[in-house]
Image (spheres, rainbow, N blue to C red):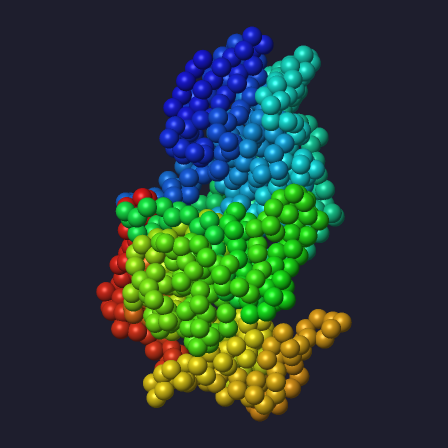
């Protein structure tokens, strides 16, 4: 046996080397400098050692390989901060990335057959390593993920993925997988042609060796006209004479259509905001027209170009590094014992309560779902029944598992059923009086050491905690709808909330496998407050006479997942109106109105157009057709501007900058205290343009000085809501960024 730092190699009596990837001190294998160095040594040994006839590469972990070490990528992205000129840094980056591509090229051209025995998840660079092998056999585990997810975090596959996958299964099949970062289970990967065989886990290595023995028993063939004789199974399809790309190359009739239609579809979906997707398309289009080694150089060039794009750095940081740190509990107070919720009480069986019940029962908790009416409580449980029925249809669960989950949810009207709950979450109507009433009834039912949470999206936690006997155990736990799909939970600290309560709330969020952010108390907290500026700006534009269709199109062009008027309809205008009226009542003379107040009042009070739930809002929702903008909007506003007179870029900036301004104000006021919470919360909570990495990352990307200058101009034109805060002016003067001036505590993040 030969032992390397991250691998071990054993040669059996048939001359087959079993290479086991098992990085010490890690739960998963990743592509690091160390593992790549070992790979180079192993490939050299395979080539030079006559005792080795072929090789099987597998993993000693549950997963095969999780891909590249993105913390290393994050340091490179955006140009890095190393010494030397920009040109020198780009050259070094290109050469370093090309080195890995050429390493995998040497694996597939080593002259001896290599099989990837994929025992578990193989993502990103992990899959790219297997694509450089001559055969792929996977263990039959439906939880295994096989794919190239780089595009989801602002990257493109940089280890040959954009070249080998299209050559293997064709551009038409490969492009959607790469552009969307889709992962497949082994059976779907087999059907797609990515793996050659799927076998029971216990037969994985033996199946790989069987394929090798059968191939090694065949006579050798000549590699090209002047090349050496090698085993036929040691030649990749694209290195064989007469090879043609499945479905055709970009200049063929079929292949050309793939790129013509694909480019149009891509622009429609991304509006040019995501450089990774654009470069992926270029890599595949250009790479399939040349030999693979030239294609790998093309890929490396685009990969390096992408790493230099600040959007890539922002996406890697927020969508991978920060999100991972927060999910692991980076913001959890230290020194507090772990807490487990075994019994959960939920007050209110509406959409939110029903969703919370489902995800909590999914995590194995006993759930008491309480409402004022038994029929409503049963209806809340029925939500879980519907979700499970869909999961059964799709083969995502079994009847036994579904029955077990439903058995954990008890619909009731009796507060006594809450006795012994470790956590009670209130999810009733947004009325301070109603919330106070249920708090007084439910809080005494908590188990010793239990905590009480409110799912309010707007009402200050400190005020709601006044109804509690133990305000130090009262905390905001704000979910997003639909709860089963939305990954974020916003945890809100009241003035008297203890660190112990925060730690317990975070442990609950970890139990249900969601990502928490921690914010301090204020009206609207962080997410609702910032989200409101986006939909509010859309209403302001409508009031100015900007054509409704233009408002909606520009909103989507910014990278927001939904247009502002449509979003107003989704969250319901009557809710926005009621929250605004409650805010007016609470603040009195201190209430500062918005340009949208009168418009919303007219829609709700006078016209009854309250949104999608009523079948009419800014859109009409016919029962038998697609929604359409309400034709009466023009008459409602009473004025309309000519689209040709409007600056589309200015409209886009208004949508993005108004959100970023509010996020910066929240940071300055101490509502949010960690830049990671601000950016991740924005993307996961209300869908802030992911390409920017979050609102604070957007300000850093634009530059504080340029951002302040742009906002001052908008304030002169559209009003004081665009006035930059004192913090932003100070940052502009000093040339600061949020991620340098307020860098997260990395030691705490790693703890």
Whole-percent x, y for residue 604 in the image = 57, 84
Whole-percent x, y for residue 705 in the image = 31, 68
In the displayed structure, 625 sits above or below 392; it is: below
In the rendered image, the quadrant that contains the C terminus is: top left
Which residue shows up at 27% across the image and 69% down it?
A: 727
Res. 412 visible in picture: yes
Q: Is 617 positioned to the left or the right of 476 in the image?
A: right
In the displayed structure, 87 sits above or below 641; it is: above
Which residue shows up at 52% across the image and 40% down it?
A: 124
Q: What residue occupies the far right of the structure in this picture?
A: 624
Which residue is more in the foreground, 728 or 28?
28
In the displayed structure, 420 sits above or below 223; it is: below
Whole-percent x, y for residue 671 in the image = 33, 67
In the rendered image, the quadrant that contains the N terminus is: top left
Which residue is more in the foreground, 137 or 418?
418
Residue 457 found in image quarter? bottom left
Whole-percent x, y for residue 296 in the image = 53, 37
Residue 148 found in image quarter? top right
Which residue is more in the foreground, 252 or 370?
370
Which residue shows up at 61% across the image and 51% down it?
A: 406
Please count the marks in the image.
0
Res. 683 visible in picture: no
Which residue shows up at 67% across the image and 12% down it?
A: 217
In the displayed structure, 20 sits above or below 643; it is: above
């Amino acid at each position: 046996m030969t032992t390397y730092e991250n691998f071990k190699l054993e040669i059996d009596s048939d001359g087959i080397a079993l290479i086991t990837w098992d990085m010490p001190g890690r739960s998963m294998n990743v592509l690091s400098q160390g593992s790549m160095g070992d790979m180079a040594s192993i490939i050299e040994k395979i080539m030079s050692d006559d005792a080795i006839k072929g090789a099987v590469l597998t993993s000693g972990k549950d997963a095969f390989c999780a891909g590249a070490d993105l913390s290393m990528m994050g340091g490179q992205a955006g140009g890095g901060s190393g010494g030397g000129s920009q040109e020198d840094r780009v050259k070094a980056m290109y050469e370093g990335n090309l080195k890995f591509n050429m390493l995998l090229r040497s694996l597939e051209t080593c002259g001896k057959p290599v099989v990837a025995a994929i025992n578990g998840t193989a993502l990103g660079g992990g899959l790219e390593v297997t694509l450089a092998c001559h055969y792929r056999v996977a263990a039959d585990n439906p939880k295994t993920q096989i794919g190239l997810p780089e595009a989801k975090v602002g990257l493109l596959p940089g280890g040959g993925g954009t070249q080998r996958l299209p050559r293997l299964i064709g551009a038409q099949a490969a492009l959607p997988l790469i552009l969307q970062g889709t992962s497949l289970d082994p059976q779907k990967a087999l059907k797609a042609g990515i793996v050659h065989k799927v076998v029971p886990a216990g037969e994985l290595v033996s199946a790989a060796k069987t394929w090798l023995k059968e191939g090694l028993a065949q006579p050798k063939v000549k590699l090209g006209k002047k090349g050496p004789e090698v085993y036929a199974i040691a030649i990749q399809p694209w290195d064989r004479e007469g090879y043609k790309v499945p479905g055709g190359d970009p200049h063929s009739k079929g292949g050309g259509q793939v790129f013509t239609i694909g480019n149009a579809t891509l622009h429609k979906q991304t509006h040019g905001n995501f450089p990774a997707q654009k470069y992926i398309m270029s890599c595949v289009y250009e790479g399939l027209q040349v030999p693979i080694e030239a294609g790998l150089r093309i890929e490396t060039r685009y990969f390096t170009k992408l790493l230099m794009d600040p959007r890539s750095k922002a996406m890697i940081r927020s969508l991978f590094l920060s999100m991972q740190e927060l999910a692991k509990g980076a913001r959890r107070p230290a020194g507090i014992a772990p807490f487990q919720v075994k019994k959960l009480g939920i007050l209110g069986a509406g959409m939110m309560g029903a969703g919370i019940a489902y995800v909590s029962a999914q995590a194995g908790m006993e759930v008491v779902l309480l409402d004022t009416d038994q029929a409503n409580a049963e209806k809340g449980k029925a939500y879980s029944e519907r979700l499970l029925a869909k999961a059964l249809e799709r083969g995502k669960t079994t009847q036994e598992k579904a029955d077990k989950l439903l058995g954990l949810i008890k619909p009731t009207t009796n507060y006594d059923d809450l006795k012994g709950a470790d956590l009670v979450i209130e999810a009733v109507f947004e009325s301070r009086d109603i919330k106070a009433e249920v708090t007084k009834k439910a809080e005494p039912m908590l188990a010793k050491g239990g905590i009480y949470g409110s799912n309010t999206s707007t009402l200050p936690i400190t005020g709601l905690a006044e109804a509690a006997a133990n305000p130090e155990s009262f905390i905001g736990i704000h979910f997003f709808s639909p709860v089963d799909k939305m990954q974020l939970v916003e945890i809100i600290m009241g003035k008297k909330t203890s660190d112990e309560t925060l730690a317990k709330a975070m442990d609950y969020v970890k139990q249900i496998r969601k990502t928490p952010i921690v914010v301090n108390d204020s009206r609207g907290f962080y997410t609702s407050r910032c989200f409101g500026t986006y939909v509010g700006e859309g209403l302001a534009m409508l009031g100015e006479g900007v054509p409704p269709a233009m408002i909606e199109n520009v909103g989507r062009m910014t990278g927001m997942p939904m247009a502002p008027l449509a979003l107003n309809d989704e969250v319901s205008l009557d809710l926005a109106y009621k929250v605004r009226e409650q805010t007016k009542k609470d603040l009195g003379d201190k209430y500062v109105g918005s340009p949208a107040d009168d418009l919303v009042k007219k829609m709700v009070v006078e016209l009854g157009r309250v949104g999608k739930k009523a079948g009419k809002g800014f859109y009409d929702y016919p029962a038998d057709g697609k929604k359409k903008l309400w034709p009466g909007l023009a008459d409602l506003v009473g004025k309309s501007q000519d689209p040709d007179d409007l600056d589309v870029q200015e409209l886009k900036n208004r949508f993005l900058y108004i959100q970023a301004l509010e996020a910066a104000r929240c940071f300055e006021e101490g509502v949010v205290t960690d830049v990671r919470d601000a950016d991740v919360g924005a993307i996961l909570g209300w869908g802030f343009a992911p390409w920017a990495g979050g609102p604070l990352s957007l300000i850093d990307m634009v530059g504080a000085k340029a951002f302040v200058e742009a906002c001052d101009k908008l304030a002169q034109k559209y009003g004081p809501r665009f006035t930059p805060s004192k913090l932003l002016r100070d940052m502009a003067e000093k040339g600061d960024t949020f991620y340098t001036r307020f860098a997260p505590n990395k030691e705490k993040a790693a703890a």
